[in-house]
Every structure is written in C-alpha cells, then in structure tokens.
Image: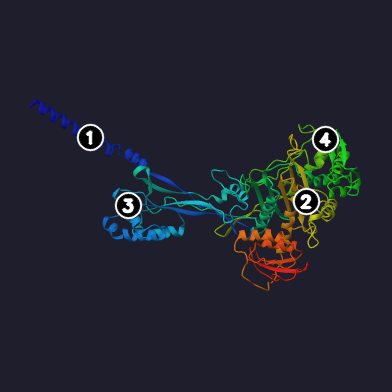
Amino acid sequence: MNRLNLVLLLIVGLLIAIMVQLATIQFVDGEKYRGMSEHLTIKQDTIFANKGSVFSVDGSLLATSMSQYEIRMDVVTVKAEVFEKNVRALSESLSKMLGKSTSYWETKIRKGRNAKNRYLFIAKGLGYNDYVKVKSFPIFNLGVYKGGFIAQQTTVRAHPFGKIAERTIGYKDDRGAPGIEGAYSKYLDGVNGLRLKQKIAKGQWKPIGDNNEKEPINGQDIVTTIDVNIQDIAHHSLLRQLEYYNAEHGCVVVMETKTGEIRAISNLGRASNGTYYETRNYAVYESHEPGSAFKVMALVAALESGKIDTSTVVDTGNGKYRLYGRDINDSHRGGYGKISVARSLEVSSNIGFARIIEENFGKNPNEFVDILQKMNVTDKLFLTIKGEGTPGIPRPGDKKWSKNALPSMAYGYNLTLTPLQTLTFYNAIANNGVMVKPSFVKEVRSWDKHVESFETEVINPKICSDVTINKVRAVLKNVVIRGTGTRLYDEDFSMAGKTGTARTEYWKADWAVDKKYISSFTGYFPAENPKYSCIVVIHKPDAKTGFYGADVSGPVFKDIAQKIYTSNYKINVVEDRVPQYKSVEDSYTAYNVISDKEYTSIPDVTGMAGMDAISILENMGLKVNCEGNGKVVAQSLNAGEKLIKGTTIIIKLT
C-alpha cells in the first residue's frame, strides 16, 4: 500500500505540474506562443503591382504587363454533400476549358480529397478572362473557404511587336535594367501590395480570405518617341542589309531634327546560327573610330577657326602622302591632285583633311581640340538610358598622343564616338546649329491622364556660326549629288550626308588577309528643310561583297528616307483584289524572285509587305504613292500592264 500511495502521489504531482504548465502557457506566455505560431504558419506575401505600359508616339503598345493565374484547390475544405453534388459538374467545366476528359478531372479531384490534399494543382498560365471563368465553375464559385478555390496571380511582361527595338524598350529583371524600362522604372514599377497566406501541408501556402491586406498600385504608362511605322522600316531595312553583307552587327537611328526625339532605333547582332536579333544597344554604348564621318566635325572646326574656307585649295597629290614616317592613302587611285576643301569632303580625301588640320593646327593641337570641346563633341550626351559610351578625344600629353595623332583625328582615327553622339552633331548641322539632346520618352500618363512631359533639351544653342552651317550643309548636299554618295542620289527627293568607311581591328597581324571595316552613312533629309536626321552603322561586312559606306550603309539610309517621304502622300486607290501572298514568308520569297528579274510589265504585289513592294516598284522605275501601313491590299496599275518608267502607281496598305 505504501508503494501504491507513492505512485499515486507522483501521478497527482505530475498532473498538477502539467496543469500549472498549461496555465502558464495559456495565460502567462500565451501571447508569446501565439505569435510564434502565427509567425510559423502565417506570413505576409507580396502582391506585385502591374507595371505600367510602354506606348509608341502614335499610341501603339510596345510593352505591357499581363496577369497570369495559377489555380489550385483545397479539396479538404469542401463539405461532403457539396462535393458529391457538384464534383461531376466541376470536372465537365474543367474538361471543356483545359482539355482532357471529364473522368480524368473527376478522378484527379477525388484522389486529392482521399489524400487530404489542400493544394491540388489545377492549371497555370491562365489569363484574366480564363481566371474569371474558372472562378465561376461549380464548387469554385463558393470561394476560398467553402469552395476551396485558390488563385495565385503573377505578372509577365509582353512585347506585342516582338524583338523590334527590344534593347531600347528594355526590361527590368534579373538580367538588369537597360533601355526605357530600366531608366523610367520609378514611373513604371508601381507599388506592391500585401496578402496574408497560411502554411498548409508539405511547406505549401494558401491565401487567407479573398481580400488583400494592402492593394497593389499599378505603375504609370510611358509614351515614347518611337514611331512604329518608321521603326518597322528602319528595322527591316537594316536587317536586309546585314543579311546581304553577312555583317557582324549594325545599328540605325532616326531622329526628328527640331526636337531630338528618336523616331526609330534598331540594333541587330548576328547569332551563332546566322540570324540577327537585338543583342546590345550599339547606338548608345558602342564607341568606335568613326572614320570619314568625323571629317564633318574637322571641317566645322577648321572653318570656325577662320584659318580656311571651303574654297581653299589643298594638294592631295597622287593619292599617297607620307607624314611623320607614315603613309596616308586615298581610296581613289592616282589621287585627286589639287582640289578645294569642299571637294575634299565630297570625295572624302584622307590626305586632304590630314593636310588641312595638320598645317593649320599642328603647332597648337589644343586649339583644334578646344573647338571640338566648345561644340560638345568631347562630351557625353548624358542620356536617360543607361550604358552610354564615353567619347575618346585625346589631347597632347595623353597616352594616345603622338605626332600622327592630329592628322589621324582629321579623318576619323585615333578617337572614338558612339553612333548617337555622331548623329547628334550632324543633327545640329541640320538644325541650324542648335544641338538638342536625343530623347526617347515624350510623357508619362496614368489612366489616360497626363502626369509629366519631357520637353526638348538644348545641349548647345549654337555650335558654330550660320556662315559655317550654310557652307557645310551645301557641301553635304553635294556629297550625295556628286561625291562619294552619288549612288544614293534621287531627283525626286533630296538628302544630305557623309559616307564613312573605317578600318577596324587593323592592329591585328592578319588584317591584310582578313580585312575588317566599319561602314556608315550619316545625314538628314530633306536637304533644304531637314525633318529627320539618320545614322546607319554596319560593322564588319563581308569585304568580298563590299565595305564602302555608300554601298553598305547608304542604301539603308536612302530606303528609310524614301519610304518616309512616300508615306506622307494621301491618295485614293482605284482597285481592290484578293491578296496574292498569304504570309510573311511568301512575301519575302516573292521579293527575292521579283528583285532578281528584269520586268517589262507591272507585277502583282498585293499581299506583300508594304516596304518590300515600294522598294521593288521604285527599283523598276515607277513612282510610288501609298496610303496606310502594313501589307498591300490594292494597286492602281493592273498586274500584266506594260511597264513604263516614270509612271505613278498607287498602292493601299492595311
């Protein structure tokens, strides 16, 4: 009995201790443990705000956030009578929308219920409309608690125009934050919301309730300066030339002269499989030796110094000139002899410019660089888009400086500029000396309401005198009429600009065997009252096919100018017919076939991409007027009619 009493006493003592401990946990440390429990089983989950959309200047959607939903089911929470009554109807609805048989879905849901699955996967990647439909299905329409409906929302970034201008439109994710999306993220990102979630089996979490703790605030919209029509023209013109010359990469930029607004920008690089896509924003970041494109800067500096005039005569000799132990060559065999400074630019004489700059600034090279600095050639543009390359303009005393530095700079070597920096200077020439900053964004909007505008920013109100501007513009016009750009001349519309052909990687031992060039054309149009400026730069074209700027890059410039000029005409089309080409592939195939033929009659271009049709018809000697954008749906001259050069053909695009 003593032993029994002792055991009973111990049991009673243990029970009392347990009760005391329970009371302590419940009443004394209750808040502490309840907090720990909630911390382990309940958490605040971020609801990411939808980013604002990016629009072109004409209202086309360039980038937008799309909601996607993942649907799951807490099968346990549904009452037995509700489940048995509606599971068949739910399975039928899921079958109609998601595929697979009704029996498949019923079996899956019943197995989930038997396994007490509180997070049964149903579907993912659904759009908002599909999400709403699923939410209305039997059982699911009872909500989270009674119907076990679990929906998790995520957002994905979509680009309706695909890869066109992708690097400039940009993104902001684990890859970085380039382009407009990165630069204007404070407007686009919005404010994230919060939602409570509860931990369930196997480390899974489900939302608590239908309402959020904090609602997300969606981002604001950005209206860019990009014009999708000009962008499309620029992209495909550049692509076609890169493919023809099997070039490594290239870029094209079209800028509105007065405002500096970028209407088109395309940057294409060659992938390992030979296709081209937007790899880097070459126009913004890639500093390189501009070659003959820099002769315009050198000419302006020399004219502003008062040391020369465009009529000043320079002796270029027989095309070879030795200076400080190094040969300088002109591309024209036999040389140009004694010619004016203006003619030196028209024919792009390296010797002429080396002598002009060396003979007038050789004793004081800093004077030449100082003039460049006053014209902001030595400065970055400080673009809103990240990654701008820094101009590399050396001075006496720098590591790159030597006796040959100054004459080399005169024709575009021993210095570096980005394509956009070069274009900005040319644009200032076209804009009567006013240098404006290139811009990519026009305004910020929220729910179609104006928030903020971005006005034209003037970098330099006058880079040089009006006298110099007028002289240089006259010479640049003559470059196209009778100089290195004469192949681009068209009597129907005027252009002005400068060809550029620069050696690259010439420091490598095998350059003579495997020659590499950078081909460019920079200018503006129309020549008399410029509306747009444009630069085309193509790196490392196949030298066996061609490498001169007028041949490689010039046609892209002309194509863009020609199509922009043509699109300004509004006309009526007299005939409609069923399109001949049913796909983009058919259109490209037809373009190649028609382009290679010598036509004596009018071809049928209905259904073809507009820009390809215009190019074909104009190459045949026809004058083309068009209306609209897109594919050809009608043409005024019937297929098979006799081809008479100079005749006007009207095409309608849609």
The reply to whether dot 2 and dot 1 touch (C-beta < 8 Å) is no
Q: Where residue 606 appears, x then y in whole percent?
A: 65, 67
* Residue in the foreground of this view, choosing between 383 and 574: 574
* Neighbourhood count class around disc 1 (C-alpha, 10 Å): few under 14, some 14–19, many 20 upward: few
Observer-side mark, 2 or 4, equals: 2
Instruction: Tell me, yes or no, whether the two marked residues, 1 and 4, touch with CB atoms within 8 Å.
Output: no
* Alpha carbons under labels 2 and 1: distance apart: 95 Å
First in residue order: circle 2 vs circle 4? 4
Q: Quadrant of residue 35?
A: top left
- Determine the secondary structure under disc 1: helix
The secondary structure type at the circle numbered 2 is helix
Q: Secondary structure at mark 4?
A: loop
Few, some or many C-alpha atoms within 10 Å of disc 3 (few <14, some 14-19, many ≥20)? Answer: many
Q: Nearer the viewer, residue 39 or 504?
A: 504
Residue bearing the label numbered 3: 75
- Left or right position of 240 against 306: left
Compared with 516, 137 (above or below) is below
Horizontally, is 65 left or right of 425 in the view? Answer: left
Instruction: Give the distance between the C-alpha atoms of the residues marked 1 and 4, in whole angstroms.
Output: 95 Å
**Residue assigned mark 2:** 550
Q: Which residue is mark 4?
A: 404
Q: As shown in the figure, which amino acid type bears the numbered disc 1?
A: Val
Residue 482, position in %: x, y?
85, 54
Residue type, numbered disc 3? Val
Sequence order check: which comes first, mark 4 or mark 3? 3
